[in-house]
Image: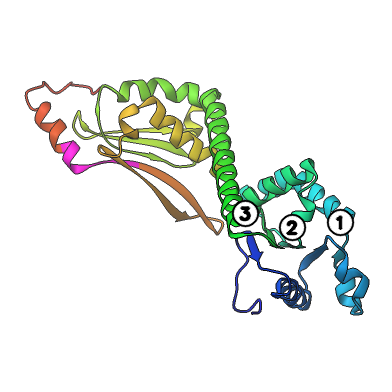
């Protein structure tokens, strides 16, 4: 197994009994990454390899338990800075962390919590972790379940926090009255882009409202996480959008003028729900000016 035929985009756990080749596997990855000139650290928690290693190139990348803990703390403190670089579209140099005998480093609560936080956000900020440890299948199952729950809980908390900030912003204060009026209309689709929120109605017929941020003296929503939070907040204040039987939510990608791509979001009406609403509105008089102005 070499770096040419494997990817380390997600945190990887190597499980095996004593003598099964876990450390050799990590050292093979270490050698490949050294040749490629990557920033890579081998956390030798029990210091078995540090004491016996004769290869000077490898020794430069070895860390003992204390140094490994310091590395985890440093990377944890860099998370916000690396996230900001990702959201600005800046290139990040990947960091590879290879941990031999993971269980031995989890006895410190602070180190454990910082490592868990790294594992939850690692793929986004180009921090790649490969860890090896001995444990029974029961331990493996319970540990993976714990990682999954922690990652899901952290993401839900982060999304809820971003959405709460979005709903309390000046921009959303300008948009909110428009969303309230949407509840009185039949919405064909709502498109959320960095520069605008576009609302297309099918009742009143052929109404198309564009809330352009700059036209209201507001900055575009350039941060991807903030734009998604805006899309989630809109569904909260126009509750019908959150019903998958009535509307479907989709993510799209478009090229930027200066290069690269950006994501934008759309709520679009399900055809069965649209037909049902049109039949219900059939005898209603058409408002002359529409509801949204």
Q: Which residue is mark 3?
A: 139
Observer-side mark, 2 or 3, equals 3
Distance in Å between CA atoms under marks 1 and 2:
10 Å
Q: Is residue 25 above or below residue 134?
A: below
Residue at position x 52%, y 31% in the image: 163
Please provide percent x and percent y for residue 233.
45, 30
Residue 287 lies in the magenta stretch: no
Mark 3: which secondary structure? Answer: helix
Mark 2: which secondary structure? Answer: helix
Residue at position x 78%, y 46% in the image: 111
Tag 1: Cα neighbours inside 10 Å, few (<14), some, or many (≥20)? some
Please provide percent x and percent y for residue 121.
63, 49
Q: Which residue is mark 2?
A: 102
Please provide percent x and percent y for residue 293.
32, 23
Q: Which residue is mark 1?
A: 65
Tell me where residue 205 sits by quadrant.
top left
Residue at position x 39%, y 31% in the image: 235
Residue at position x 52%, y 27% in the image: 171
Mark 1: which secondary structure? Answer: helix
Q: Which residues are magenta?
A: 267-274
Tag 2: Cα neighbours inside 10 Å, few (<14), some, or many (≥20)? many
Q: Is residue 172 above or below residue 64?
A: above
**Mark toward the start of the polypeptide (3 vs 1):** 1
């Amino acid at each position: 197994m070499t770096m040419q035929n494997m990817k380390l985009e997600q945190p990887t756990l190597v499980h095996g009994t004593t003598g099964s080749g876990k450390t050799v596997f990590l050292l093979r990855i270490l050698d490949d990454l050294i040749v490629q000139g990557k920033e890579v650290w081998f956390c030798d928690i029990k210091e078995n390899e540090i004491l016996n290693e004769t290869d000077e190139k490898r020794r430069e990348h070895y860390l003992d338990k204390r140094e490994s803990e310091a590395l985890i703390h440093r990377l944890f403190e860099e998370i916000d800075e690396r996230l900001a670089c990702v959201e600005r579209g800046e290139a990040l140099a990947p960091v590879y962390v290879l941990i031999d005998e993971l269980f031995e480093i989890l006895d410190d609560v602070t180190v454990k919590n910082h490592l868990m936080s790294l594992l939850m956000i690692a793929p986004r900020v180009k921090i790649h972790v490969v860890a090896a440890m001995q444990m029974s299948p029961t331990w493996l199952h319970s540990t993976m379940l714990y990682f999954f729950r922690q990652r899901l809980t952290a993401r839900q908390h982060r999304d809820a926090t971003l959405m709460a900030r979005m709903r309390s912003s000046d921009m959303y204060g300008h948009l909110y009255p428009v969303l309230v009026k949407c509840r009185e209309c039949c919405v064909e689709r709502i498109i959320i882009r960095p520069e605008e929120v576009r609302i297309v109605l099918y009742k009143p017929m052929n109404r198309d409202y564009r809330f352009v941020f700059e036209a209201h003296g507001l900055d575009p929503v350039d941060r991807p996480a903030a734009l998604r939070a805006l899309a989630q907040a809109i569904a909260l204040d126009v509750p019908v959008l959150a019903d998958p039987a009535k509307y479907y939510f989709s993510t799209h990608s478009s090229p930027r003028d200066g290069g690269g791509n950006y994501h934008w979001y759309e709520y679009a009406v399900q055809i069965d729900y649209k037909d049902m609403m049109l039949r219900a509105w059939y005898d209603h008089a058409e408002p002359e000016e529409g509801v949204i102005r």
